[in-house]
Amino acid sequence: MAQFGRTTEKPGINWERAFDLYVNAIACDNELLWVQATTKLAKLSKHAPEDLLARTIPVLVELLRRIPSTDLSPSIQEAAAHCLKCVACRGEGRLAVLIGESGAIPSLLSLLLHADGSLRRVLLKCLRNSVTFAAHNREIVVRHGGLEIILNLLNTCSDDLKRYLLEILSALALLREVRRTILISRGVCFLVEAARRGSMVSRCRAAQAIGLLGLVKRARRTLVDSGTFSVLLELLQVGDTSTKVVAANALGVISSHVDYIRPLASAGAIPLYADLLQGTDPMGKEIAEDVFCILAVVEENGVAIVEHLVRILRGDSAEAKAAAADVLWDLAGYKHLPSVVRNSGAIPILVQLLEDQNIDVREKVSGAITQLSYNEADRAALANSGAIPRLVDMLQDESEEMRDNAAEALVNFSEDPSLGDRISDVLNSPSFQNMQERLTQIRASDAYLAASLRHMNTEQLTMDPAALI
């Protein structure tokens, strides 16, 4: 066994001979030798070739199932579980899959039912690594009653073992059936705690599971009452980029219910989503935009959001300015917010940004200005900020979207008795005339639809479509 004890820092190690030595040691009727050899294998596992480790898995699983005949510490079961835990981390999940296919998980769960002390700790670590590195192993755990074992242990175990249990739970909770059981068995508090404690990878998984559970309407109240807001907001502060995106999305799912819009904003969500909007992750920006549109349903939230958007528009990041203008584009259509946007000082900044060098910024800003041009007071503010000549110039822009936005805004200006004379020079522009015709058709269609609906009776509105076939 001398060669098997070498590490890869020493050149020339013969891994095949090392494996043969290990197999020969296990073939001996000497439990102490089994433990010593398996302990050395665990130490070497971080350096050993993947194919060699794959061949050790059946041997380790067999050792896991052997009933110790002595009072050795660690026992052969503990040594085997520790070695499997180390092997599961290797091979980018491939070895963890092999561990699951070898039948190790039912044995781990069976031992866990009666284990205590250091053996319980090692079994939990082994199980954690098995479900962390191989998604299929999660299904095996659930199929063999592992979820119930984990939930029971969470109710009774000491605090020093809870981290491992929570990390196992966060992996299992990515399965729909597990989330359903967690909700029914009142285990949501453990899922929320899993998002608060443990490795960041595990906390991110728990946040993802919380977001998926939040899609169930009856689960949202339980999640909120269990402290979900504070936990996810903490992840938005301290998590890495991917964790922040997952936490932000989960919060957005829960906040989509009107009862939670004010509590989420009061908990400090708006500044954190503003930070996400300024980040580099495209999905993070998209989530922040969507959540801002939800939170802005409440006027005081809208005031705070617009303040952050104005600050971003004054910044140097083109991507962040484009994202902020895109949100303002949406918020400008909220009937309770035009005065908020106008009073924030956003309009002069938007007009200046029509000349920004970044085309995405100009397109998003032109869209926001077009939406604002539907409000009489905003039109006056836009005109006073010099928007009209810039919009006229945009009719010649290379971007079709910008030409359309400019024409639509100018049509709105032309219909304003106090401002129509300022755009007389563009009345004959093809872009302007085409947009004017399109808007006339859209408005006529909307008016016809509204009139048709007024003439429909209740019976017609509730009629079964199948009856018309």
Image: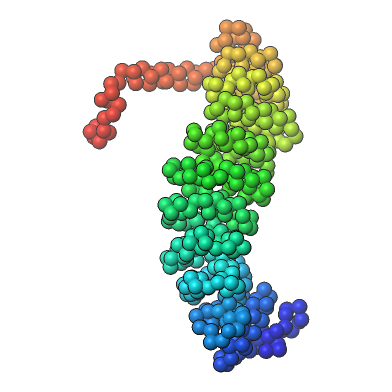
The location of residue 70, given as percent across then percent down, is: 56, 86
Q: How is the image coloured?
A: rainbow
Rendered-image quadrant of the C terminus: top left
Residue at 62%, 81% (x, y): give it: 73
Marks counted in the figure total 0
Q: Is residue 311 visible?
A: yes
Residue 334 lies in quadrant:
top right
Q: Nearer the viewer, residue 27 or 341?
A: 27
Q: Residue furthest right?
A: 10
Rendered-image quadrant of the N terminus: bottom right
Compared with residue 103, is residue 352 higher up or lower down, i.e. above or below? above
The location of residue 18, given as percent across then percent down, is: 65, 86
Q: Nearer the viewer, residue 303 or 30?
A: 30
Q: Is residue 245 visible?
A: no
Residue at 60%, 86% (x, y): give it: 34
The location of residue 453, given as percent across then percent down, is: 34, 21
Residue at 53%, 84% (x, y): give it: 68
Q: Residue furthest bottom?
A: 29
Residue at 60%, 54% (x, y): give it: 203
Horizontal side of 390 relative to 261 (left or right) equals right
Horizontal side of 188 relative to 428 (left or right) equals left
Q: Nearer the viewer, residue 304 or 121?
A: 121
The location of residue 319, given as percent across then percent down, is: 68, 37
Horizontal side of 307 relative to 218 (left or right) equals right
